[in-house]
Amino acid sequence: MNIQWYPGHMAKTRRMIAEHLKLVDAVCEMTDARIPAASRNPELHEILGDKPRLLVINRADQADAAGNAAWVSHCRRHGQAVLLTDSKSGAGVSRLAPAVRALLKEKIEAGAAHGRTGRVLRLMVVGVPNVGKSSLINRLAGRRAAAAEDRPGVTRGRQWVNLSPGLALLDTPGILWPKFEDEGTGMLLAYTGAIRDEILDAETLAAHLAAFLQERYPEALASRYRLGGNVGGRADDGTGDHAGGTAGGDDGMTLLARAARGRGFLAAGGLPDTERMARVLLDEFRGGKLGRFTLEWPAAGRDPQVAGGEA
C-alpha cells in the first residue's frame, strides 16, 4: 500500500508552528500510546529545536499497561519529560500543568528573582492528526474549547485557549510529514486513524490489521468475532519487533471473511461481506472495543525523539 497524505493545510501548519514558536514557553507534543514512535512527526524535532518539550503519551487506555510503562521508562531514560494520559476519561490530564511548571522551573524561578511573578505560561500543543489534542484541551478547559472528533483533520487553524491558573494553550492542526520512508510507519498511522480513510482501500488495510493482530493478539480476534478454532499467532513478547505493513495478504483476507461470517455479514449469494467487515474492524479497533494493544515497543539504544517507525 502506497500511503501518502500531505494536503496543503499541513504545509501551512508547519509554517505556523515555526512562526509561533517564539510566542510560547514550551511545547506539548502528543503521541498515541498504541504507536508512540510512529506517531511522532520527525519534522517536529527539527522545527522545535531546543524549545522545552513535554511528551504526552495519550490514549493510554487503549494500549497495553505493560507497553505504557515500557515507553514511559524508555523516554525518561533518554532524558525526555513525559506524561501518560487518557484525554477522554481525563486520567492523567490534571498532572499536565504541574508537569509544565516542573519543565519550566528554572525559567519561572529566574523570573521570580527579577520580580516577575504570576506570568501566564504559554504552551503550544502539537502532534499528528487524531491523537487527541482537542480532547485534551477540552478536558483542561472544562468546556468544549476546541473541536474534537474521532477522525483526522478536524482542527484546521490555530486556537488560543486560556486556562487557569496561569496557563494558556495554543492548539494546532494535526501534521504529518510528506513521505513515509518506512511503509510500516504509514500502516501503523493508518490503523489508528491518523490518515483519512478516504485515500486508502479499507479492505486491504483491515486485512493487514487483522493479520497483525492475529500474530500479536490472536485471542482478541477469536473472541470478538467468533472465529473459533485455532487462529494462530502469538502474543507480543515486548521485544520491539513489529510487522506493520508486512502482514496481511491472503491470510488477512481469510480472517476478514471468517469474521464477516461470524458476524452474519453476508452479501449476495451468501458470500462474506468483507467490505462491511473491514469498516467494522477498523472502527472497533480504533474505538478500543477489541481490547488494549501496543503495536510497537521501545528498542534499547534508540532515541525516542526520532519518530517514523520503531523507537
Image (tube, rainbow, N blue to C red):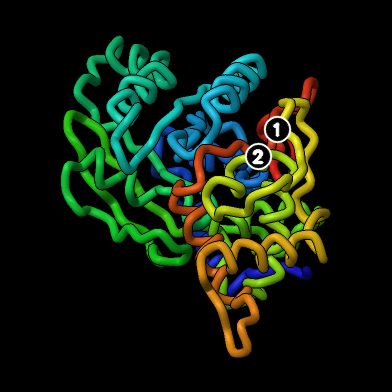
The quadrant holding residue 48 is top right
Q: Residue 290, position in %: x, y?
A: 51, 47
In which quadrant will I find the N terminus?
A: bottom right
Q: Residue 234, position in %: x, y?
A: 75, 35
Secondary structure under badge 2?
loop
Question: Alpha carbon of mark 2 to alpha carbon of mark 1: how far?
Answer: 5 Å
Q: Residue 226, position in %: x, y?
A: 56, 53
Of the pair 23 and 169, the residue shown nearer to us: 169
Residue farthest to the bottom, as pictured: 268
Q: Residues within 10 Å of mark 1 (few under 14, many from 20)?
A: few
Asked if residue 14 shows in the view, the reply is: no
Relative side of 66 to 172, left or right: right
In which quadrant will I find the C terminus?
A: top right
Image height check: is 8 above or below 248?
Answer: below
Q: What residue does disc 1 label? A: 235
Q: Which residue appears at 62% of the width and 60% of the height?
A: 190
Asked if residue 21 shows in the view, the reply is: yes
Q: What residue does disc 2 label? A: 217
Q: Earlier in the sequence, mark 2 or mark 1?
A: 2
Q: Are marks 2 and 1 in contact (CB under 8 Å)?
A: yes
Q: Residue 153, position in %: x, y?
A: 46, 66
Secondary structure under badge 1?
loop
Three-letter amino acid code at the position of disc 2:
Tyr
Q: Which residue appears at 67% of the width and 45% of the height?
A: 38
Q: Which residue appears at 43% of the width and 35% of the height?
A: 61
